[in-house]
Image: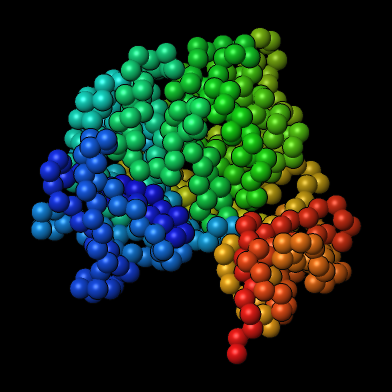
Amino acid sequence: MVGHATHTKATIWYYAGKDKTVELRYGLKGTATDNFKKQSMPPRPQNNFTSLAELTGLTPATNYQYHVWVDGAKLGEGSFSTAPIPHQPAEYNYLFASCISLKVSKDQKAWNAVIKENYDFQMFHGDNVYADNTSHSVLWGHHMEQRNVGNFAAVLTRAPTFATWDDHDFGPNNSDGSASGKEDSLRLFKDVWSNPSYGLPDAPGVFYTYMWGDVQYFVLDNRYHRTDKGSDATNTQLGVKQRDWLLDGLKKSRAPFKVILSGGSIQRGSEKWAEYEVEFKAIMNFIRDNKIYGVMFQGGDVHIVYFKKYDDNAQDVFRDITRPSLLQYETEMGYPVYDIISSGIAKHAKRPWSIVNVNTKLADPTMTFRFYELEKLKEEHVLRLSDLMHAGVKDLLPNSPFYEQQLAAGSTHPITWTTIGKVGSVNLDYNTGEEWISIETGLTNSGSYEWTVPNSPSTTVKIRVRDADGTIAGESQGHFEITRALP
């Protein structure tokens, strides 16, 4: 499966070629194939005759299986799991990897170990092939050769896939936005990777965001708009519009963890964010000034597994390009910066890759990074939400009822919420589209309340959780529905 998934939708990508009849058959895992749903997925002339099926109406956090039929014969099969309900605490795993080269690694042994792991989706951080070219046909040839590697192909059929690029699958080594033919590179990337979206109407690129449970991932494009390196405000990895999109998304996000993903890193390698200090400081200052908690950085590029904490006491921080003193990360962002890298799975002799366990069901949510080399666990690091907090910050994040859920008037349903920081007693309200109505005041902050749903039928209902001091409030993400009482 070269395609992404949400809690109710998924895409399946396949390449059979021109003038082929391609059909997808799919159903719940364990369902008899005779009961599979069928969906045509004709080759798309505008996408180099690749086929794409878009599945809707799926059930959250559910396992599915599928078969691909070409000209009446079954030629492919796989499985996937849909995402948990957005903004609901969840526990899950994902693969975190980058840098895949057939020039260096023909057998790519690490995939044999990866396929044995139990994870829910995979995130590829660039250099997914080493074409070093912007030619559509050259890039296409490299991607197709890579997808014919048996163990890699097997990995692609077992979980939803999200991807970004770095220099070697964007253009030449260390290439930037001046690369001739970058529009062809972008067109090719859209042909072979089915990401949730691509850039903005007025800012092309491979950047996008997605939710998995209550964690939000911001996938960046660090190549298409990149300028020369330097300490001037005009030197950028992202470009103004992508940077504004990122900052706006971080500010609006209601996720405990906000993971910023790119093909590069903060400090390691020649293409690090340290070479664009003004831009990175602007991002850190925005996070600090807006008290945005839970931000962390994941990257690739440099063929190592790496977990580094930068704060006021760090010795290994990048130097300000314009002055000799050290740039103090914690001063700039308000809490430590974590630079986390997983790179070289099929490029370096040690074959580094990672599995990340996310658990936001805990009182102090965690992300646990398990780093592998030579298919053996090398080290493990636990990052807690409390590690990514400004002093005194607190917040309330409603989880249930959730978006588009239907509740019958008169029924009992739990209102649940996640507490960030220290919050004492809380007040609960609901709104059917006109005004906020009190449910209860002065509740002990247990994170849950059994609610008798009022007889107020509406399709635009929200819940609000407020602290008793009136300083913070969190609302439902989207509306749910109250239906008439059951007979």
Question: Which of these two is toward me, 398 or 306?
Answer: 398
Image quarter in which the C terminus is found:
bottom right
Image coords of residue 8 (percent x, y): 44, 60
- Determine which quarter of the picture holds residue 105: top left
**Is 49 placed left or right of 61 in the picture?**
left
Q: Is residue 345 above or below residue 160?
A: above
Rendered view: 27 above or below 3: below
Q: Kindly give the residue lying farthest to the bottom in the view shown.
A: 487
The residue lying at 66 percent from left, 43 percent from top is 252
The x, y position of residue 425, in whole percent, is 84, 65
Give above or below for 413 relative to 86.
below
Residue at 66% from the left image edge and 69% from the top image edge:
458
Q: Where is residue 59 in the image (x, y as percent from the top left)?
A: 43, 66
Task: Please tell me how many numbered marks the rendered image carries.
Answer: 0
Q: Which of 22 and 66 is in front in this view?
A: 22
Quarter of the figure with residue 196: top left
Left or right of 48? Residue 298 is right
Instruction: Name the residue located 72 percent from the left edge and 62 percent from the top edge.
Output: 433
Describe the colour scheme in one phrase.
Answer: rainbow
Q: In this view, does 393 lie to the left or right of 371?
A: right
- Name the residue: 66% across, 24% down: 281
| Res. 473 in view | yes
